[in-house]
Each structure stands twice: as C-alpha cells, then as structure tokens.
Image (cartoon, coloured by chain):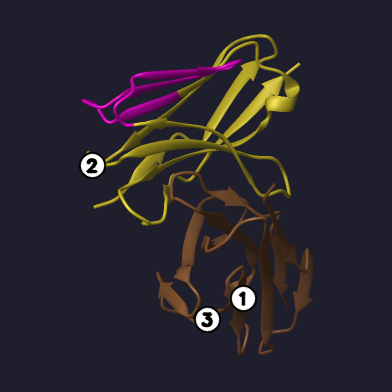
Amino acid sequence: GEDVEQSLFLSVREGDSSVINCTYTDSSSTYLYWYKQEPGAGLQLLTYIFSNMDMKQDQRLTVLLNKKDKHLSLRIADTQTGDSAIYFCAERYSGNTPLVFGKGTRLSVIA
Amino acid sequence: SQTIHQWPATLVQPVGSPLSLECTVEGTSNPNLYWYRQAAGRGLQLLFYSVGIGQISSEVPQNLSASRPQDRQFILSSKKLLLSDSGFYLCAWSVDGREQFFGPGTRLTVL
C-alpha cells in the first residue's frame, strides 16, 4: 500500500546543516516532493525530484533520492531560524493521482 | 501568475450547523483541485479531489461533501458539523499533476 514515513522531530543549531529523512513504499512513484509549512499557513512547495534522478540542488537545499532503498532526504545547509517549520515529504504516481503525504517533520532551529 | 484563495480564513461554528468553505484559483484553466484536512497541526488527510467540473472523488466517507460548480471553484460543505470536523482545511491545485500548490487554509473550530 501507499505509505510515506518521516521522523516527527528534528532539532539543530543555527548555522549547522539539517537532514530530514523520508521513506516511501511504492517503487512506482514518479515524483517525490518536499513541502514546508510555517505556523498557521498553507504548504509551500520547496522542491521536487523526478524518480530517474539521484540528486537535485537548489541554493541551500539538496535532495537525495535512493530508489533502491526508497529513501528520500532533504538537506538544508547553513540552517537559519527562519527554516523552523514542519517539512512534509510526498510522493506521486503517474497520471492525476493525488499526492501521498508523510506526517511531517517539525524542524526546530536553536539560535 | 496563478493564485489560490480560500474563504473564510477562520471560522467558529456550533455543532450541528452547516458549513461552506470556498476555494478559487486564478490564472489557470481546468486545474485539478483538492481538499485536505490537517488536524492538530500535523498530517494531511485528503478529503476530495476533482479533475473537472462536476467530477468529484471522495477519499474518506464522512459528513462532508464537495462540489465544483465552476472550472476554478471548489466548495467543501457539510449539512451538520461534528466536533471532529475541527481542523485546518487546505485547498490545493495542480495543472499537470506534477506540481501541486496550496492555498492559505481555513481554520475551522466546531464548538
């Protein structure tokens, strides 16, 4: 069945790197996503990666995909207090099927 | 550019009262539209999605319903609210199913 798992909490010091991990179960996923949610707000699409890619980098964000282990990670370099939020991993199959979301990882950045 | 609106931003309703939440998208045509509920500030639950006018798929049987009277309008309704309907309701849209964008959300409190 469809399932996306994430750890619930992560705490890092300002300036350090953050790594948020995610595992998924369906090997036929075509796209994998990372969303950010700040308190009281909707979800903001940060980045996504196509399943035939291993890595995608966008400024401070690096996404790594290990298809063999069905493992996705989001690395945030030089983490800032403004990065404190809940980060959701999501996967999508082909066509118009809705995204399947994990429960989110709450990132706390300590100054 | 595309924008998505949700109305109202916050709502407090008594148990047993009706509900109508509205979502509208601007700047695109024939979007896929989605309703999610987020309880207790965590995990997203897909409620309904629509690939066209009058086409609604329900993911979770409950006392909520959805309608799409116009191409870029998606409405979430209930005839009688329950306490368990409290939560943060998020509308989202996509065009090709690859990128999915979220609205600002509606905070519903049922007393």
Which residue carries the number 3 mark? B65
> Closer to the N terminus: mark 3 or mark 1?
3
Q: Are marks 3 and 2 on the same chain?
A: no
* Image hue for chain B: brown
Q: Secondary structure at mark 3?
A: strand
**Looking at the image, which is closer to me, A92 or A104?**
A92
Q: Which chain is yellow?
A: A
Q: Percent x, y for residue A15? A: 68, 9
Is residue A72 part of the magenta span, yes or no? yes
Q: Are marks 1 and 2 on the same chain?
A: no
| C-alpha gap between disc 3 and disc 1 | 8 Å
Task: Indicate left or right for B66 with B18 as reference.
Answer: left
**Numbered circle sitting on residue A28:** 2
| Image position of A29 with respect to B51: above or below | above
Amino acid carrying label 3: it is Ser
Amino acid carrying label 1: it is Ile
Which residue carries the number 1 mark? B75
**Numbered circle sitting on residue B17:** none
Q: Secondary structure at mark 1?
A: strand
**Looking at the image, which is closer to me, B74 or A21?**
B74
